[in-house]
């Protein structure tokens, strides 16, 4: 299996962003492969992967099955990493929605 460029960032962490992601390059096809090569072995992480979307450009897909083939975005695997331990369990979180312009052409 050929190596795949894997980009990732920790969502909500200071100094981390989609614009300046971390990266590793390994033979990755499934979530299990990704986790095998992921640079940090931490409990309580959740992974979302960027997927092409014709309407909005891209969306984030939650992947939890280690056997599931990961989606690629522009030829790369791009992950948003959530630290579940830093989220307030059981407390409702405020949602802030922003209106986004949609190209209807």
Image (cartoon, rainbow, N blue to C red):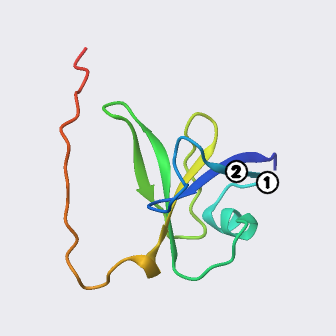
Q: Residues within 10 Å of mark 2 (few under 14, many from 20)?
A: some
Q: Position of residue 69 (x, y in %)?
A: 59, 56
Which residue is rendered at x = 25% and y = 85% of the image?
A: 90
Residue under pointer 1: 26
Q: Secondary structure at mark 1?
A: strand
Which residue is rendered at x = 78% and y = 53% of the image?
A: 27
The reply to whether dot 2 and dot 1 touch (C-beta < 8 Å) is no
Q: Quadrant of residue 98?
A: top left
Comparing 33 with 20, the one in front is 20
Give the vertical position of 29 relative to 85 (above or below). above
Q: Is residue 101 left or right of 43 when viewed as pictured?
A: left
Q: Quadrant of residue 66?
A: bottom right
Q: Position of residue 1 (x, y in %)?
A: 81, 50
Q: Residues within 10 Å of mark 1 (few under 14, many from 20)?
A: some
Residue under pointer 2: 23
Q: What is the quadrant of the C terminus in the image? A: top left
Question: How many callouts does the rendering have?
Answer: 2
Q: Position of residue 71 (x, y in %)?
A: 55, 48
Q: Secondary structure at mark 2?
A: strand
Q: Is residue 70 left or right of 105 when viewed as pictured?
A: right
Distance from the alpha carbon under mark 2 to that under mark 1: 10 Å
Give the vertical position of 12 relative to 6 (above or below). below
Q: Quadrant of residue 29?
A: bottom right
Q: Position of residue 92 (x, y in %)?
A: 19, 76
Which residue is rendered at x = 20% and y = 54% of the image?
A: 96
Comparing 21 with 64, the one in front is 21
Q: Report the mark closest to the observer, 2 or 1.
A: 2
Judged from this view, the residue extending furthest toward the bottom is 90
């Amino acid at each position: 299996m050929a190596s795949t460029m894997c980009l990732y960032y920790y969502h909500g962490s200071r100094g981390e962003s989609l614009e300046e992601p971390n990266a590793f390059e390994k033979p990755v096809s499934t979530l299990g492969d990704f986790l095998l090569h992921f640079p940090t072995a931490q409990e309580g992480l959740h992974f979302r992967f960027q997927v092409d979307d014709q309407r909005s450009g891209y969306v984030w897909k939650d992947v939890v099955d280690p056997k599931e083939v990961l989606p690629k975005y522009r030829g790369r695997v791009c992950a948003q990493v959530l630290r579940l331990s830093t989220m307030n369990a059981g407390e409702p979180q405020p949602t802030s929605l922003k209106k986004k312009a949609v190209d209807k052409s």
